[in-house]
Image (spheres, rainbow, N blue to C red):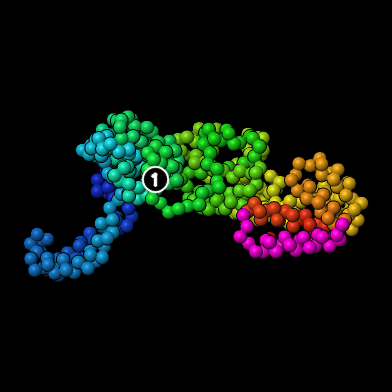
Amino acid sequence: MQQRSNPKRIERTPKRCQDLRHQPAARIQATLFVKLALQLSYTLHLRQKPQSYFEASKKTAIMLFKSILPAAIALLPALAAASNVIDLTPDNFDSVVLKSGKPALVEFFAPWCGHCKNLAPVYEELADAYASASDKLVIAKVDADNHKSLGKKFGVSGFPTLKWFDGKSDKPIDYEGGRDLESFTKYIQEKSGVRPKVKAKLPSNIAMLDNASFKEKVGKDQNVLVAFTAPWCGHCKNLAPIWEDLANVFVNEPNVLVAKVDAEAENSKALAAEQSVTSYPTIKWFPKGSTQPLPYDGARTIGDFVEFLNTNAGTHRTPDGGLDITGGTIEALDTLVAKFNGAWESGNEEVKKAAEGLKDKYAQYYVKAFDKSSKNEGYAAKEFKRLQGLIAKGNLAPEKLDDLASRSNILRKFLGKEEEKSEL
């Protein structure tokens, strides 16, 4: 949050420029284009015949108007594309917010504020998402640097400040959540019950952590990889789709959690300070049972992240979300497979005893494979072929696909296919 700047700075900035800074880009460009066209037309005319703008004949004015009319008409849609964010002033604040009976989310901003400029497109998108519910909800903003009385009235000391008015009381609640569309819509829906009209998105598998939930997740029974980000950070935006892919790759790994912290959200700032986060994105690794992190300094590609997690969490994932050729296998039992290769019956008892002391759910599959192979020499080959056929058909739930891949990998050991590339 940026603190108030010297008022003299604002005095040197023409008000029309301040107004333009918070307008949609298309509208600004259209407005400037029309003004430029007008200036150019009049300039050309004056060069041809020196005379005052105010002395121009009616005939000349009509000709000039006709010359720019096509361009102006073409730009009318952009000019008419008014923002769905309501602009508040001391004159309309009470009627729009305090006396409308509708809940309202209000942004107190300053035209010179960098964080406000970063928030502007997200806030526009938020207002668009609730445009169809304008009879139930208000999304608004107030230039609190220009209208200082409103900022002072509601205790605004930095920008941007977002406050929630419930439509019943004139005492607002500070909004302290993330400054992304998902966080805003979730908050508004919880407070008002009003649903946004946005494109359906698949639920994210990233765990969003804050001051409270971080303590609930880290240091427990999961390995946690956390990215500390900021909404305005360009590198964070580049990382975002990769981080989503990473969370999807490890969604079925119970001992791995891919998480994110909006380090500039009010409910996460203390956490970011505690973790000494000074730049974005900062990625930290918290091993299972530990609250002492290790910094991640590797490359930020899906392949590098997957390799890091496999090495440190003992997983066997591939960048496309499948299992590699070792997924599901147990080294201690693989040793017995190699020892009794072809003499399965004589190894039955030993593998049963070894499996009893293992908590791995596929330990008993080794026992089954030993027993079946001792009774049917071609069991492993036939079963492997069957499993591969099921995988090839597709349309399998991720959990089922993992199960088939794990059993296939175990059977590879019985077939002596350790070095063969996975078909998964």
Q: Position of residue 75 (x, y in %)?
A: 26, 62
Residue drawn at the location 79% of the way across and 42% of the way down: 358
Q: Position of residue 317 (x, y in %)?
A: 67, 52
Q: Is residue 240 on the magenta stretch?
A: no
**Please, what secondary structure does the residue beneath circle 1 have?**
loop
Most common SS among magenta residues: helix
Work out whether residue 16 or residue 320 is closer to the camera in this orientation and state it: 320
Q: Quadrant of residue 188?
A: top left
At horizontal 58% and vertical 51% (from top left) the residue drawn is 248
Is residue 387 rendered magenta in the image? yes
Q: Which residue is mark 1?
A: 195
Which quadrant is the C terminus positioned in?
A: bottom right
Q: Identify the magenta region.
A: 375-397
Q: For the N terminus, which image quadrant? A: top left
The vertical placement of 49 against 246, above or below, is: below
Residue 22 in the figure: left or right of residue 263: left
Instruction: Please tell me whether residue 172 is drawn above or below residue 64 in the rendered image.
Output: above
